């Protein structure tokens, strides 16, 4: 699954410039595919489960940068942000640096990936 971000591209994200690295190009398609699978079940994923399931070498508190880039990739595809599906295992909510209304965005994600019939029916994956 190709990214719509380019290696070496610099993006203004949350008031800072973020450059797409070779590691980003490697991990973002995996994260995208994983989260599309989560979306089709109407669930959410924790930062820890995503890190473990994919074998991501980043620290859990470093996944926000990747999720910001994933959100930009989704935006370029005219899709709702898959990052809205990634939540804390302790709070069940997105991280504090998430921009936007995560529950509303999740509804759009479910509608996009499951179809309008299932948009109202998220499944608790905990």
Image: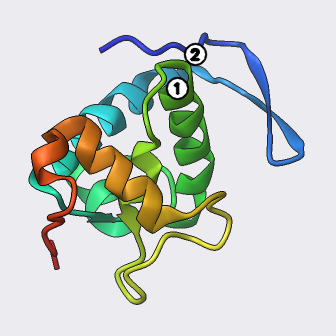
Front tag of 2 and 1 = 1
- Can you identify the residue that label 1 sits on? 73
| Quadrant assignment, res 84 | bottom left
Query: In the drawing, what numbered circle is on residue 5?
Result: 2
Residue 57 visible in the snapshot? no
Identity of the residue drawn at 19% across and 62% down: 43
3D distance between C-alphas at marks 2 and 1: 6 Å
Q: Pointer 2 and pointer 1: residues touching (CB < 8 Å)?
A: yes
Give the number of the disc on residue 125: none
Q: Which residue is at the front of the view, 46 or 94?
A: 94
Location of residue 122 with respect to 51 vertically, above or below: below
- 64 is higher (above) or lower (below) than 96: above
Q: Is tag 2's residue or tag 1's residue first in the polypeptide sequence?
A: 2
Residue 23: % across, % down? 52, 28
The quadrant where residue 7 appears: top right
Label 2: how many Cα within 10 Å (few below 14, some 14–19, many 20+): many
């Amino acid at each position: 699954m190709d990214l719509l971000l380019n290696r070496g591209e610099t993006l203004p994200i949350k008031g800072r410039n973020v450059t797409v690295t070779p590691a980003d190009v490697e991990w973002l398609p995996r994260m995208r595919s994983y989260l599309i699978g989560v979306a089709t079940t109407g669930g959410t994923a924790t930062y820890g489960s995503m890190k473990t399931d994919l074998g991501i070498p980043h620290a859990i508190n470093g996944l926000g940068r990747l999720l910001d880039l994933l959100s930009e990739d989704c935006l370029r595809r005219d899709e709702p942000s898959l990052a809205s599906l990634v939540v804390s295992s302790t709070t069940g909510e997105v991280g504090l640096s998430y921009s936007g209304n995560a529950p509303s965005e999740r509804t759009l994600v479910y509608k996009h990936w499951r179809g309008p019939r299932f948009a109202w029916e998220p499944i608790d994956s905990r």
